[in-house]
């Protein structure tokens, strides 16, 4: 539905009142937008027309209302009671992807000589970034091929696998803050860890895009690596059933899947939510799982693993919304 929503002058602090050019969806089932295919509805979903439209939307949302940015929902559970505030869907909106000829003020380093900068906006699918870099004879980004999320989600989660990590390649990011202002930030403004990224001086803002530095290399070999990675994933992950990837982070020196399997939980089920029989750190939706089933199963795994092994698992998946 196209929505000509004219923001009031009050919303804009008395300034100009542009017409929002994106789409609002009301009471939108979020199961359509998350890979678990479960969960409640969002009061309001907004699909921006472009970056400028997104900045105006953010400025128009009153400070007491929550804003949730969702990419491809591949790491997200929305509780059955639904989400208040505004959910903004970025996938397919901010989709610029290009080799950068400018340095963007980034200081050159000697080791940068045989590298290129790639600019990717937050709505680009991570596998597309992997293929794009390989097709431009840039190496080191192959791991993104196996991450079924957006570049924005990969930046927020520091997504990675098979030895690659998103922030190993990121040199600068563009963010949008809660006031609707765009900022450019360097890596050293963040605390970066395993599946964790946070501003050193926390404030509410989201990733709009990023500049990745990759080395020139053999594009053919890079495309072969991507094929091999995808084969490994098909062999080891339950890709035919709705899931959200690894539910828990791997504890230092261990694997969450090994601990969960060691507790005899492979195949354990609450409602239609099941610990995958293929990969114990995945929870699959057998068809009609609710978000409550999935969350109860997550809690059951945490309690069982802690009771039997003394290890407190840390969640990798993000949970938002209200309990029913
Ligand atoms: C089959 C499968 C395999 C997976 N394998 C891996 C893997 O190997 N490695 C790995 O790391 N992950 C993996 N994942 C998890 C997931 O794909 C990644 O975490 C991915 O980066 C999430 O991206 P998304 O766009 O789907 O984010 P979403 O699920 O939409 O959001 C996740 C979180 O990021 C935030 N977010 C999203 N976009 C932005 C933005 N632009 N700015 C700020 N915050 C934002 C959201 O608010 C939310 O808190 C897998 C998932 C599946 C289903």
Image (tube, rainbow, N blue to C red):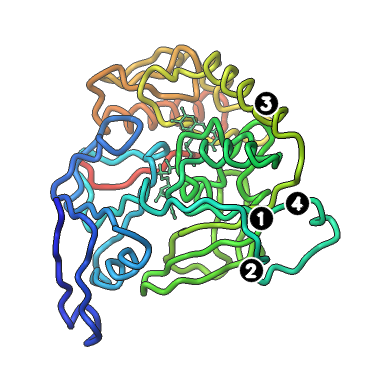
User: What is the CA distance from the residue labelled 4 to the residue labelled 3?
Assistant: 19 Å
Callout 4 touching callout 3 (CB < 8 Å): no
Callout 3 touching callout 2 (CB < 8 Å): no
Q: Residues within 10 Å of mark 1 (few under 14, many from 20)?
A: many
Report if residue 283 is visible in the image: yes
Above or below, 295 relative to 275 = below
Q: Provide the residue designation for mark 2.
A: 104
Determine the secondary structure under disc 3: helix
User: What is the CA distance from the residue labelled 2 to the residue labelled 4?
Assistant: 15 Å
Determine the secondary structure under disc 4: strand
Q: Residue at x 32, y 47 (%)?
A: 320
User: What is the CA distance from the residue labelled 3 to the residue labelled 2?
Assistant: 30 Å
Please state the horizontal and vertical placement of residue 25, each as a whole percent of the image. 17, 50
From the image, which quarter does the C terminus lie in?
top left
Q: Residues within 10 Å of mark 3 (few under 14, many from 20)?
A: some
- Compare marks 2 and 1 and give the one earlier in the sequence: 2
Q: Quadrant of residue 272?
A: top left
Q: Provide the residue designation for mark 3.
A: 225
Q: Residue at x 82, y 56 (%)?
A: 113
Q: Provide the residue designation for mark 1.
A: 117
- Compare marks 2 and 4 and give the one earlier in the sequence: 2
Q: Provide the residue designation for mark 4.
A: 115
């Amino acid at each position: 539905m196209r929505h000509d929503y004219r923001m009031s002058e009050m919303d804009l602090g008395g300034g100009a009142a542009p017409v929002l050019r994106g789409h609002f969806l009301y009471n939108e089932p979020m199961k359509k937008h998350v890979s678990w295919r479960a969960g409640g509805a969002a009061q309001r979903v907004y699909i921006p027309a472009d970056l400028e439209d997104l900045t105006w939307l953010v400025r128009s949302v009153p400070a007491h209302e929550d804003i949730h940015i969702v990419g491809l929902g591949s790491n997200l559970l929305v509780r059955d009671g639904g989400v208040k505030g505004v959910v903004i869907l970025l996938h397919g909106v901010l989709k610029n992807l290009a080799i950068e000829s400018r340095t963007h003020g980034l200081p050159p380093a000697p080791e940068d000589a045989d590298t290129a900068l790639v600019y990717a906006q937050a709505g680009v699918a991570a596998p597309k970034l992997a293929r794009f870099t390989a097709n431009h004879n840039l190496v080191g980004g192959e791991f993104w091929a196996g991450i079924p999320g957006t570049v924005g989600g990969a930046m927020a989660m520091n997504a990675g696998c098979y030895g690659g990590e998103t922030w190993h390649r990121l040199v600068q990011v563009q963010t949008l803050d809660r006031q609707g202002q765009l900022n450019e930030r360097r890596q050293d403004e963040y605390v970066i860890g395993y599946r964790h990224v946070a501003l050193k001086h926390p404030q509410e803002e989201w990733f709009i895009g990023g500049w990745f530095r990759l080395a020139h290399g053999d594009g053919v070999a890079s495309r072969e690596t991507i094929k091999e990675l995808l084969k490994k994933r098909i062999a080891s992950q339950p890709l035919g059933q709705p899931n959200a990837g690894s539910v828990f982070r791997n504890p230092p020196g261990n694997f969450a899947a090994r601990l969960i399997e060691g507790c005899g939980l492979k195949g354990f089920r609450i409602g239609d939510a099941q610990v995958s029989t293929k990969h114990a750190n995945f929870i699959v939706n057998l068809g009609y799982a609710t978000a409550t089933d999935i969350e109860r199963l997550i809690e059951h795994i945490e309690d069982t693993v802690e009771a039997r092994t003394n290890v407190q698992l840390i969640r990798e998946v993000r949970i938002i919304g209200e309990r029913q």
